[in-house]
Amino acid sequence: MPANFAPADPSNPYADYTEAQLHAAISTLVPRYYPGSHYEYANLGFGLLGHALALRAGRSYEDLVVSRICAPLGLESTRITLTPSMRPRFVPAHDSGLAEVPHWELPALAGAGALRSSANDLMRFLRASQNRQDGPLRAAFARLLEVRRQTDMGDTVVGAGWFLRVQHDDELVWKDGDTGGHTTFIGYSARSGRAAVLVANTSSGSSTPMIGQHLINGSFPLPKIYRQVTIAPERLAGLAGKYPITPQFVLTVTPRGGRLMVQATGQAEYEVFAESDTRFFYRVVDAQLSFERRDDGVATAVVLHQNGRNRRANRLP
């Protein structure tokens, strides 16, 4: 995220981030890696690309997408600004605890996820992505997979926007995305041609892509089902504190109204759910937390389990 990203409303974090702030952030940004030498997923990267293309075209990002992509493909339900026909079909958004939350607005970083769409439109987009129809975008779609870079996920490379996962004698071409209350997966098999779209009006970033990949190829596993248990508020209170995974990446744990909230540096605050008195799981990402408690119930450390890594952090005094 941009260094000056400090949302006033965590439930709609991009809404007050302006183009002026984006330009200020870019003017002071010093790249840490030579272009093409390092992979790191970045909402800033997608948002900045959309902003730059819109400036170059001399029109808004939405107008550019509608004229260059939606119109040629017949995507009538893919817009940022809801049309009269889309408005009554726009479903409410929910967080990982199934509470209704605001729809996110991304005025300055629209390329990072401002578009709203339907399952039917996304299937049309997938058919075009698989070069199953002729048209003015056929050559452009083919170019999206020409350059591939290794990601930090061993069996996955990235093209121009698409991820490609080679496993189970298959090659999956896919992309997922989520806001505070919606999660989407689109993808297809480059070998079998089978395609899938999965849209959820809940924040379920860890399970939705796994289910989507399983729909395309049953050899890809379904997500693990975690069983939530109830923990007394006084036991949750003993987990409060700051836990530095690194000096620049701190987990701030806050019990609130019988819920346990965790905020990582530079990220939104999310609820974690109890599997036991010491082990909690996220629903927005595939990650878990294991707390180490003293006899009096106060936590002394936490272990973050994510992407096959176990990273331990002592609680700050």
Image (cartoon, rainbow, N blue to C red):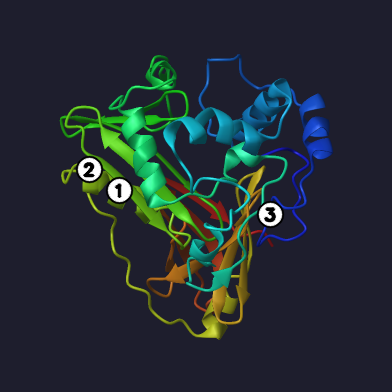
Tell me if I can see residue 237 in this picture. Answer: yes
SS under mark 3: loop
How crowded pointer 1 is (Cα within 10 Å; few <14, some 14-19, many 20+) is rated as: many
- In the image, taking residue 174 as reference, residue 213 lies left or right, namely left
Q: Which residue is drawn at 43% across and 31% down?
A: 152
Q: Distance between the residues labelled 3 and 1?
A: 27 Å
From the image, tell me which residue sits under label 3: 13
From the image, tell me which residue sits under label 1: 212
Indicate the position of residue 158 as horizontal and vertical percent values: 42, 26
Q: Which amino acid does label 3 sit on?
A: Pro
Q: Which residue is drawn at 79% across and 43% down?
A: 18
Classify 11 as above or below 63. below
The tag on residue 169 is none
Image quarter (top left, top right, bottom left or bottom right) of the N terminus: top right
Q: How far apart are marks 3 and 2 (CA)?
A: 33 Å
Q: Closer to the observer: label 3 or label 2?
A: 2
How crowded pointer 2 is (Cα within 10 Å; few <14, some 14-19, many 20+) is rated as: many
Dots 2, 1 in contact, CB < 8 A: yes
Q: What residue type is labelled 2?
A: Ile
Tell me if I can see residue 154 in this picture. Answer: no
- In the image, taking residue 166 as reference, residue 59 lies left or right, namely right
Q: Residue at x 28, y 27 (%)?
A: 132
Classify 67 as above or below 233. above
Which residue is at the front of the view, 242 or 193?
A: 193
Classify 219 as above or below 295. above
How crowded pointer 3 is (Cα within 10 Å; few <14, some 14-19, many 20+) is rated as: some
Q: Distance between the residues labelled 2 and 1?
A: 7 Å
From the image, tell me which residue sits under label 2: 216
Q: Based on the displayed image, in which of its 4 quarters is residue 180 positioned? A: bottom right
Q: Based on the displayed image, in which of its 4 quarters is residue 5 positioned? A: top right
Image quarter (top left, top right, bottom left or bottom right) of the C terminus: bottom right
Q: Residue at x 54, y 60 (%)?
A: 301
